[in-house]
Image (tube, helix red, strand yellow):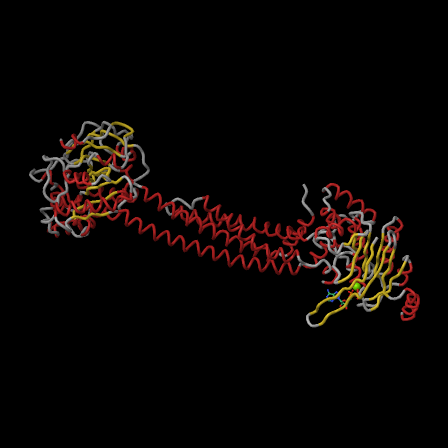
């Protein structure tokens, strides 16, 4: 232990004016906390933008039929389907136009509803109601990369059932919401509407297909109808089983590849591979389970695109939710590739029939905006730091003035200017250590607030960098009063009372 | 030991200029006990501060052991104050935040003395001063006489060769003042040079030499005796 007496003197002087010292610490803590949080948020916004734009989705060009994206909230029957273009696998050949396009695939979001064993009208009715809930739950639990698409997709599933019963659309929906357990009469009517899936339109009655194996324990899964290139584009591989091939797709194979979470949740025992699952009258074989990606992909089911099959029951307009997705290797090639695709599709289908979107542009605009907000936050935090530092420096200066006699005596006893300067600097350091510690807690508090909202907190390195940076800046500001104190003439000891 | 040549000390108070010391030449020999007397405002404290390098003169030369010290850097001056000089003030000037021990230990920390050595030396000095029962007391809990003895212990901590005392008994009752003076006399006997400002003729009588000051100047030695008589008559 070799604490020098002048340091003890410093600390006791600080303790002798507790209110002033507490104010100093508080001011430092707030400014350090604000700076650290500001820097943390800045770093977070930057990281998030970078990470987001690195995702495959943001190297894609989406080509979709105009109606699917523009009038998504209007019931399908109110739309004119005449101009609807059915995009098919053939259109993927547009990819050959541009050497920059790495992958091209077709994707259509639907929902797979399963036979959970409650066959028959009543069972199906209940099942339909439950399905609705399950869908909602599922949407909440699985972050959707394209949230605004959800609505349209769900509608598209319904629309298949409703093509011929459009006039009852509104009524049916309200029935569903207000009275899920209805009287027999309406139930019959409803059931009939529900049942009128395209695959069943020529059947008089309805029955589920059943499998020999166990029934699934969940009612439905978000599902995508994709061409096999999807897996390569998204860089997905199976942990068990295999992927489906283009040939299988063209043969209309009823196979499923499941995301890891979807596979684990489908059956009671968590085993999905090589099992069969019934959806309406189709029986799907589960041929593969994907590796975990920690993205929404984990919760999805993937089946071969039906647009490709000739014998699948399809009619014009069914492919309205289908999107052609073209992936480029390097994001800088997006613009050129988009131009080439636009030209191709314009000659193919006419202008303004298709939407050719680059999600990256919107994402970039959004991330630019959040980056600007982060910069403003940082500037505000730094202003806070500056204001606090000016005040802290001011208080320290008046402290140094009040302690002129102390300094004079110290000098008479042999303290050099340097000794006094260092003594005052150490005092500031003590204040800074406490202010810094509380500041870290403030910043971590903000960080955990953000973390509570389901996001990761502020990056720790940025928070610590902020603390370090603001401490250094504060130390610079405390140099001035320390220098001033060290200049006090020693003879003052004899004069100041 | 110390030689002052034509020292001048001026204070610039804006428009007004105060001449605190005027053409002072003075020699203090090793082992001397010098008393400085004079009316209030005559420049006694200013001279003592100068001798202790607490102030640099406006003009003139200051030789310590033959070296001109006015041009020394701050660090060197501080080292001399720390190692060779010991200050005793009228108002004690102890740190109220530090215990008696810590007050005495403080100058030794600037001299680079280790903590344990500082502690044992402080204890030894305070015991010498008859304060072994006050080691961990704060100055505010001690009497004036006790405080001044702590201050003396502090001044002695680095074994100085010169003690500069500015009215060391000024704030003390006569009996307590005598105790302090006895301590100084003892130090003088051991060979320490002592320069002491005092208003007390009896105390001045104990000195080897008395310097009389008037309006910032040292009075003629020939007039000194008259001065003593004068001031004695005046009281
Ligand atoms: N720092 C200073 N600034 C301005 N004037 C000063 C300063 N120090 C001393 N003086 C002036 O110099 C003169 C001498 O002051 P000094 O303190 O040396 O007198 P003194 O003899 O010690 O008096 P006392 O017996 O009252 O202690 C006084 O007129 C004083 O006002
Ligand atoms: Mg004086």
Which one is nearer the viewer's eye here, B209 or B70? B70
Residue A223 drawn at (x, y percent)? 22, 38
Q: Residue at x 89, y 66 (%)?
A: B220
Foreground: A437 or A197? A437
Label count reads 0
Left or right: A275, with B175 as reference point = left
State the image coordinates of residue A437 (x, y, percent, origin top left). Answer: 53, 48
Give the residue at x 76% y 51%: B80
Q: Position of residue A397 (x, y in %)?
A: 61, 59
Q: Is residue B218 left or right of residue A123?
A: right
Location of the C terminus of chain B by quadrant is bottom right
Above or below residue A410? Residue A156 is above
Quarter holding residue B62: bottom right
Please indicate, yes or no, whether residue B62 appears anywhere in the rendered image.
Answer: yes
Q: Residue at x 59, y 50 (%)?
A: A429
Is residue A110 shown to the viewer in this render?
no
State which quadrant residue A280 falls in.
Answer: top left
Residue A377 vertical placement versus A252 (above, below)? below
Residue drawn where x is 90% and y is 61% of the image: B202
Q: Which residue reaches farthest bottom? A: B15
Relative to B191, residue A102 above or below: above
Q: Quadrant of ligand 1?
A: bottom right
- Nearer to me, B188 or A161: B188
- Which of A401/B22 is in front? B22
Residue A260 at x, y percent in the picture: 29, 33
């Amino acid at each position: 232990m070799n604490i020098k007496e002048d340091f003890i003197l410093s600390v006791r002087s600080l303790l002798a004016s507790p209110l002033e010292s507490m104010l100093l610490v508080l001011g430092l803590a707030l400014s350090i906390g604000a700076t650290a949080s500001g820097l943390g948020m800045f770093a977070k916004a930057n990281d998030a933008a970078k990470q987001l734009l690195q995702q495959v989705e943001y190297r894609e060009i989406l080509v979709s039929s105009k109606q699917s994206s523009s009038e998504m909230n209007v019931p399908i029957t109110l739309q004119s389907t005449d101009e609807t273009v059915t995009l098919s696998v053939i259109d993927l050949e547009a990819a050959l136009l541009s050497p920059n396009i790495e992958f091209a695939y077709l994707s259509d979001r639907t929902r797979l509803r399963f036979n959970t064993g409650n066959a028959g009208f009543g069972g199906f009715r209940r099942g339909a109601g439950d399905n609705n809930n399950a869908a909602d739950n599922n949407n909440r639990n699985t972050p959707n990369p394209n949230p605004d698409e959800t609505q349209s997709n769900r509608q598209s599933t319904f629309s298949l059932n409703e093509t011929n019963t459009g006039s009852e659309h509104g009524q049916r929906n309200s029935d569903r919401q207000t009275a899920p357990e209805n009287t027999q009469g309406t139930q019959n009517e409803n059931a009939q509407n529900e049942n009128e899936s395209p695959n069943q339109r020529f059947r008089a009655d309805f029955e589920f297909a059943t499998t020999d194996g166990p029934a699934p324990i969940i009612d439905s899964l978000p599902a995508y109808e994709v061409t096999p290139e999807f897996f390569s584009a998204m860089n997905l591989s199976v942990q068990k089983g295999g992927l489906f091939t283009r040939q299988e797709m063209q043969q209309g194979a009823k196979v499923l590849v499941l995301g890891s979470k979807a596979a684990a949740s489908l059956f009671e025992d968590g085993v999905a591979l090589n099992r069969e699952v019934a959806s309406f009258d189709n029986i799907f074989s589960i041929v593969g389970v994907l590796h975990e990606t920690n993205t929404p992909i984990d919760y999805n089911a993937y089946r071969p695109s039906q647009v490709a099959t000739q014998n699948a029951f399809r009619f014009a307009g069914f492919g309205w939710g289908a999107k052609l997705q073209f992936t480029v290797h390097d994001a800088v090639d997006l613009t050129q590739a988009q131009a080439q695709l636009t030209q191709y599709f314009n000659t193919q289908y006419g202008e303004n029939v298709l939407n050719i979107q680059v999600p990256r542009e919107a994402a970039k605009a959004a991330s630019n905006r959040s980056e600007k907000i982060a910069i403003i936050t940082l500037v505000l935090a730094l202003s806070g730091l500056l204001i606090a530092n000016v005040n802290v420096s001011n208080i320290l200066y008046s402290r140094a003035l009040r302690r002129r006699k102390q300094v004079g005596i110290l000098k008479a006893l042999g303290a050099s200017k340097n000794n006094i300067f260092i003594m005052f600097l150490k005092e500031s350091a003590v204040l800074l250590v406490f202010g810094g510690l509380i500041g870290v807690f403030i910043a971590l508090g903000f960080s955990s607030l953000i973390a509570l909202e389901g996001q990761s907190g502020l990056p720790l390195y940025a928070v610590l960098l902020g603390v370090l940076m603001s401490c250094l800046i504060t130390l610079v500001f405390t140099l001035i009063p320390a220098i001033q104190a060290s200049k006090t003439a020693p003879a003052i000891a004899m004069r100041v009372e | 030991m110390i030689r002052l040549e034509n020292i001048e000390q001026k204070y610039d108070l804006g428009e007004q200029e105060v001449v605190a010391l005027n053409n002072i030449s003075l020699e203090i020999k090793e082992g001397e006990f010098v008393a400085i007397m004079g009316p209030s405002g005559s420049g006694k404290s200013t001279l003592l501060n100068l001798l202790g390098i607490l102030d640099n003169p406006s003009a003139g030369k200051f030789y310590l052991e033959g070296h001109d010290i006015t041009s020394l850097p701050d660090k060197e001056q501080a080292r001399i104050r720390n190692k060779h000089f010991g200050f005793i003030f009228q108002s004690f000037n102890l740190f109220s935040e530090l215990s008696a021990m810590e007050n005495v230990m403080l100058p030794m920390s600037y001299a680079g003395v280790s903590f344990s050595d500082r502690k044992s030396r402080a204890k030894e000095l305070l015991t010498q001063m008859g304060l072994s029962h006050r080691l961990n007391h704060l100055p505010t809990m001690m009497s004036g006489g006790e405080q001044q003895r702590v201050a003396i212990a502090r001044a002695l901590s680095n074994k100085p060769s010169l003690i500069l005392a500015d009215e060391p008994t000024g704030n003390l009752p006569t009996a307590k003042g005598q105790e302090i003076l006895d301590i100084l006399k003892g130090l003088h006997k051991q060979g320490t040079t002592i320069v002491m400002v005092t208003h007390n003729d009896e105390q001045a009588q104990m000195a080897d030499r008395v310097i009389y000051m008037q309006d910032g100047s040292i009075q003629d030695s020939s007039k000194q005796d008259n001065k003593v008589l004068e001031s004695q008559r005046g009281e």
